[in-house]
Image: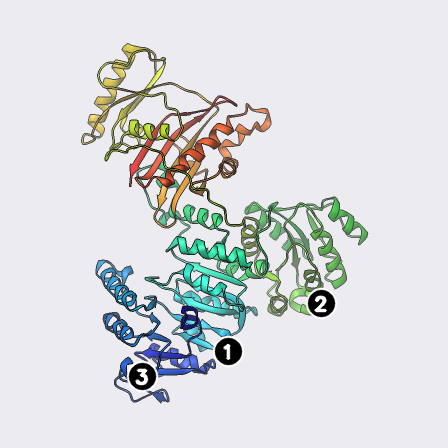
Amino acid sequence: MSLSRALLSPRRIALVGASADAGRLTARPQRYLRRHGFGGELFPVNPRAAEVLGERGYASLADIPGQIDFAYILLGTEQVEAQVAACAARGIPVACVLADGFAEAGAEGAALQARVVATAKQAGIRLLGPNSMGVINTSEKIALTTNAAFEAESIPTGRVALVSQSGSMMGALLSRGAARGLGFSHLIGTGNEADLTTGEISSLLLDDPQVDVVCLFMEAIRAPDMLAEAARKAHALGKPIVALKLGRSPFGAELAASHTGALAGTDAAADAFFRAHGILRVTMLEALLELPPLVAGRRPPARTHRAVGVMTTTGGGGALAVDALGVRGIEAKKPDAAAACKLAAAKLPTHARLLDMTLAGTKPDRVMAALDGLRAAEDTDIALAVIGSSAQFRPQDSVAGLVEAAKLPGKPVAAFLAPQAEASLRLLAEAGIAAFRTPEGAADAIAAYCSWRAPRDVVARAAPAVAIPDAPDEADARALFVALGLYSDAVVMQEAPPPALRYPVAAKILSPDIAHKTEVGGIVLNIADEAALREAAATIRARVAAGAPDARVTGILVQPMAKGLAEAILGFRRDPEVGAVVLLGAGGVLSELHRDTSLRLAPVSEDEAREMIAEVRALTPLSGWRNLPRGDLDALAKAVVAVSRLAALDGVREAEINPLIVHGEGQGVTVADAWIVRA
């Protein structure tokens, strides 16, 4: 039996630890399966009950006749290992574990989880969980779960599949969707993902003809290669993947030895991962529900304008939408020439950022004409209709024009309903039109759409040929960057100043133990001559001896002073979730404070490097903004590409140039300070 059939469409299910007491949690899977119409065979395993909720009970898995497709282990943590072994003995292809207390509970739990996985792998069993609330396939009436949301009398079906690392959020999203007429084809709880991961399950769901969109509720990115593979498959099939991932706050960011480690926290890296692989990322729970109709059946646009055409039948509601979009960097645009021509022909306004039809109302022909005009614009991505009170009191009339307009080919149409209007939401859901309850939800979903790109092609780049010592200092870091093609004009001083220096110079402590030299007084700038350099070196050594007495000192680094048009931070890091990333941002000692950065998965192309430069606000003046001198953006882009090549060098965990001084056009860049951390 295939994994897809056993996991998503089992017909013979063993419920290990099923309770004969209908009020207990461990009785729910059996009750829910029968309540929602499961027509397959159930085998409750309960050594103390010959009959379980009206069906024959079995003392053990060994007593069940015939092949078993799926075993749901409902027993406590301490009994799971033995039951997985029993599944192995019976040759059951898929086992799901409800219990928690495994890897998330500490070293002992992690060891138990490892033993369970090893037993399953040896027997060829695929494991879902631990900490999994099961599998739901609405079209085949499989409600194999303990989630209390399935106490509902009926469950709406749909063409959106949900993979959730949180079991409780499966029920939350199910109930929120049902309230507005949105259903799911599947809901899968992955829990700890000790074996089966979000990526592998998503890939299976994409093969299902009942699935148009796969939604992910994630707490962590596990097995990123599998998720990336699923994303490429999704793009090829025209079945988008939409993700909501937790961990956006700075409280979850992992600190590291370099500025890059603090700036390129796990969430920023996750964002880069989703972008690189063509996964749409939303930040609001509502948007996870509301975005799928907007992208179902579509592929990423070749180019987006980050702009929307907005019509409204409520001035205040329209202004709310425009404001929320603007906060997310999406412009509500005035009609361009193509749109204005169509709007004028329909005797509709053509001059404003917001096409206000408050007085005209929601007559279907007028709404159709307005949306037809807005969709004709060549500089927008979406047409958004904002509907006022008529959506609550005249649902058929208020959305009729919208529904008809959406049937015509062209750019997507969406709606924000200002009032509480459940009937209108349901009508729009039935028509497959994205409808938003809040302007913030609309903005979140539309921003995700406007950021959507096809999965990128990665060109393999050779690793630099350089040996990295066990305890590298800045001189070693500079040698690495030289191997990448970034020139360094610094020299190492032990006792006497090196000859033929070009003064004035900067002098810095060399130590593998000191990442931030200014914090221990390890830098002196603008040293005028040799005598001053001797004095500065002595001062630096004295300060470091006082401020960091245990630090190993390997010398003094001396470099000619350099001044450019801007300072950048250019860093590399191996993120624990998604792997190698490269970061570009505003440089200097305040880089962490400003947090003006751009991040990509490494390695990057020169085009991607230029995109990164454009995203850093502090570097905008280098483009010649307001007639300011132009910086050497070609050299900066090449530097970003060079540092991103560290992805091919396994020996480096982090690396950083801060600051990287950017000079005028054609004058290159200067490595002012460098740092590496071994893997």
- Residue 72, compared with residue 578, is above or below; it is below
Secondary structure of residue under mark 3: loop
Drawn side of residue 233 relative to residue 648, left or right: right
Drawn side of residue 434 relative to residue 222, left or right: right
State the image quarter where residue 407 is shown.
bottom right
Viewer-nearest residue: 668 or 252: 668
Residue at the disc numbered 2: 397
Residue 165 image offset from top left, x and y in percent: 39, 62
Query: How dense is the environment of label 3, judged by Cα within 10 Å: few (below 14), some, or many (20 and up)?
Result: some
Query: Does residue 26 show up?
Result: yes
State the image quarter where residue 531 is shown.
top left
Q: Which mark is residue 154?
A: 1
> Which residue type carries mark 2?
Asp
Residue 371 image offset from top left, x and y in percent: 71, 56
Question: Which residue: 31% across, 86% down?
Answer: 57
Residue 352 image offset from top left, x and y in percent: 71, 46
